Image: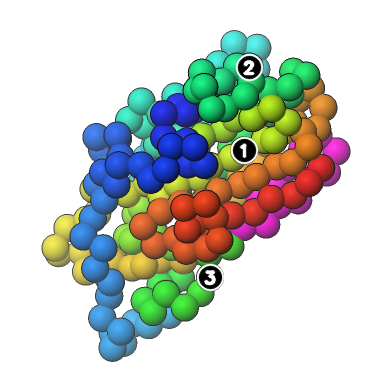
Amino acid sequence: MVSLAGCASILGQPDPDGDAPAVSAGDGAGSDPDDSNSGRTTDTAEPATTSGDAEQDETSREPSERSGEVIDGPVDSPPTNDHPWVDDPADGLGLTEVTLSISTDRTWDFLGTEPDELSISVKDDRFTVDGRGHLEWDCDRFALAHILVDDRTAEVYVEAAPNDACRTSDNDEGRGPWLTPFTVTGRFVGGRPDALEVHLEGQYIEGDGPRGGAFARTDL
């Protein structure tokens, strides 16, 4: 299970510095709007990350925890929720094999005119979330932050994860913001919940979510 300590819809804004020692929030400065490289794209290779429990087999995998690592999955929701404001899953409902993948087809959106978006599709017991959001540097990425079922509502939280590896003064071309597509896939266990909610949060993410980030919900 990914930690519930900073659950977005419950505890309010998290510490902007996060709890991951390998990342930092950056200074938030944007690129020069007069830069001649407007609209450039990049296929920069993704930084090496830790995939949590991905190497465990299906029977032994346990809920993953943030523990300072960038999590891509696969991640399972926990059978119980420790936070007093979050109900335990009803009727054995759960999420399993939740996995995030990021496209290398990023677009430099220096004016921030493109919207941050999420869409959900469901077929049988599987769901797919197609999203795109803004990251500050081209080596930053998105990570799974919280995966849980609150009573009969499944919730997936995705957040921006800065990467200090490229955040240097001699890497001006790495500065964004970069509009970055990603996909989250997973499977329902124990039947379908009543609804699936997906939240996307980060310094450059805007939308109608509970904390201003992008938000999508589908009733099942």
Q: In this orientation, which residue lies closer to the viewer: 150 or 205?
A: 150
Q: Secondary structure at mark 3?
A: loop
Q: Classify 125 as above or below 80.
A: below
User: At x 40% / y 66%, what residue is drawn?
Assistant: 178
Mark 2 or 1 closer to N-term? 2
Q: Looking at the picture, how far across and down is residue 145, in whole percent?
A: 47, 37
- Local crowd size for mark 3, using a 10 Å CA cut-off: few (<14), some (14–19), many (≥20): some
Q: Does the magenta stretch mainly form a helix, a strand or a loop?
A: strand
Q: Calculate the distance from the C-alpha at mark 1 to the C-alpha at mark 3.
A: 22 Å
Amino acid type at image mark 3: Pro
Q: Looking at the picture, how far across and down is residue 174, in whole percent?
A: 29, 64
User: At x 47% / y 28%, what residue is drawn?
Assistant: 4
Quadrant showing the C terminus: top right
For disc 1, the marked residue is 155
Q: Secondary structure at mark 1?
A: strand
For disc 3, the marked residue is 115
State the residue lying farthest toward the left: 169
Residue 79 numbered tag: 2
Q: Calculate the distance from the C-alpha at mark 2 to the C-alpha at mark 1.
A: 14 Å
